Image (cartoon, rainbow, N blue to C red):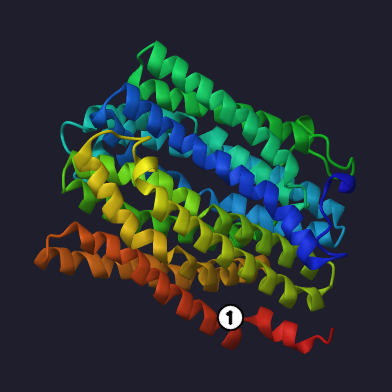
Amino acid sequence: MRSSAVSLTNGSITKGIISFSIPILISNLFQQLYNSIDTAVVGTFAGQTALAAVGSTGSLINLLIGFFLGIATGAGVLYAMYYGSDDHESLKKLIDTALILGVICGVFISVIGIVFAKQFLLMMDCPEDVIPEAAQYLRVYLAGTVITIIYNISAGMIRSEGDSTRPLIYLVISGVSNLILDLLFVAVFKMGVTGAALATVLAQTIAAVLTVRRLMKLDERYRLRLKTMRLDKLMCIKLIKVSVPCGIQGSMFSISNLLIQAKINSFGSTAMAGIAAYSRIDGFVYMPMMALTMATSTYVGQNIGAGKLYRVKKGIGVCMLITCILSITMGVLVFIFCKNLVGLFTQDADAQAYAIQMMHYLAPCAWIFSFSDILGGAIRGSGDTVKVTVITALCICLFRIVWLIPLLHFFNDIRIVFLSYPVSWVLCSMVMIIYFFKGSKLWKDIRAVKA
């Protein structure tokens, strides 16, 4: 119902974006806490090998489910446009089709991941002492892939209506559940990585149930009705066209991160543990960026759907300014308190040294990627997902591969891995800025409209 949503097509642009973004930012905080709680509890109660096992699976999990989470991104883009134009028939078809595709994709990934978990880890050069626990964590986690995809699709569509508060509430409930279950399974029942993965799956199930329940209570003209769900062929084609580029982008990121993880693995379990610890902290630096990128896509999609292109230019500028300020602030805070934060995940001095070293390369530079993320989010919100995918794939994913393989061959130094992040951020932001102002249809449409 519209009364529960923030208006992104009327009223103050700045106020609307901030009101919409704050719940998303807090949601991202709890999403990051999901991962951090697993890491902290495992590192504290199950030991360094278990911590390395959990950390080593992140890139692989993202690779296996990242492509199909493109459905969630595509559904959100289309939902914002249909919602902005009051196209209730298309909204109904989109909700049904997106969820059915999500279930199909989730089952497929679960089967593949469970059967080939150990083989995937071997391909990543995962150390032998880590593989048994990493494989077990991976199998349990991927058994819940359907739940993960359903939650992301449902939450994305709810947010695209301008309602970012309810997904936050659901995630808070899920996050608290995750903490309780983590402590119960890992600290009390001594279930190790299996308990951590099971806690996450059960907590995500709670969030998925709540978001689906919300879809069943939307406007009666397009709300979800389980008994009458059907896959609409034309909507499926449209959704795939928008979603596949988003999925490819996610997969390319995951492939490059998989290569990076494999290179990290070659430095041993201590480096793996330290980098796993900092990666959880680093996620907090990107929370503002992720929230504002999502807000940008939704804002642009709704205003295009409502025929209000004159509001888009200012909205993008507001998102960019807020993102840069928050990213710089988070980077400074992490830089100052990194040692204390790392201590929450591991007490091993050598592992902490790796984490702090990584922080020195990443935290001060995080704000640079704001330009790529916000402009990419705006272009994606206009429905042009292909170009954003190509730019990101080349400047982030392919570049890191080209950077790492030869340099690590001649200089076996982990700092080469750390440097691949800020250098690729600079490159991607430069190219995205050039494309936005020189080649994107969105910018041409904005300039053609007189406010």
- The answer to whether residue 141 shows anywhere in this view is yes
Q: Is residue 138 above or below residue 374?
A: above
**Of 327 and 196, the residue lying toward us:** 327
**Of 49 and 390, the residue lying toward us:** 49
Quarter occupied by the C terminus:
bottom right
In this rendering, position of residue 437 left or right of residue 133: right
What residue lies at 27% left-to-right and 54% top-to-bottom? 357
In this rendering, position of residue 312 left or right of residue 337: right
| Amino acid found under the numbered disc labelled 1 | Phe
Residue 133 found in image quarter = top left
Residue 136 found in image quarter = top left
**Of 187 and 378, the residue lying toward us:** 187
What residue lies at 37% left-to-right and 65% top-to-bottom? 397
How many numbered discs sit on the rendered protein? 1
Residue positioned most to the top: 189
Quarter occupied by the N terminus:
top right
| Residue 292 image point, x, y percent | 63, 60
| Residue 222 image point, x, y percent | 84, 45
What residue lies at 54% left-to-right and 52% top-to-bottom? 287
Residue 226 found in image quarter = top right
| Residue 385 image point, x, y percent | 58, 67
Residue positioned most to the left: 410
Q: Is residue 249 above or below residue 175?
A: below
Residue positioned most to the front: 336
The residue beneath circle 1 is: 436
**Of 345 and 171, the residue lying toward us:** 345
Q: Is residue 13 above or below residue 187?
A: below
Decide: few, some or many residues near mark 1? Use Cα within 10 Å; few <14, some 14-19, many ≥20. many
In this rendering, position of residue 211 left or right of residue 389: right
- The answer to whether residue 114 shows anywhere in this view is no
What residue lies at 73% left-to-right and 87% top-to-bottom? 447
In what element is the residue under mark 1?
helix
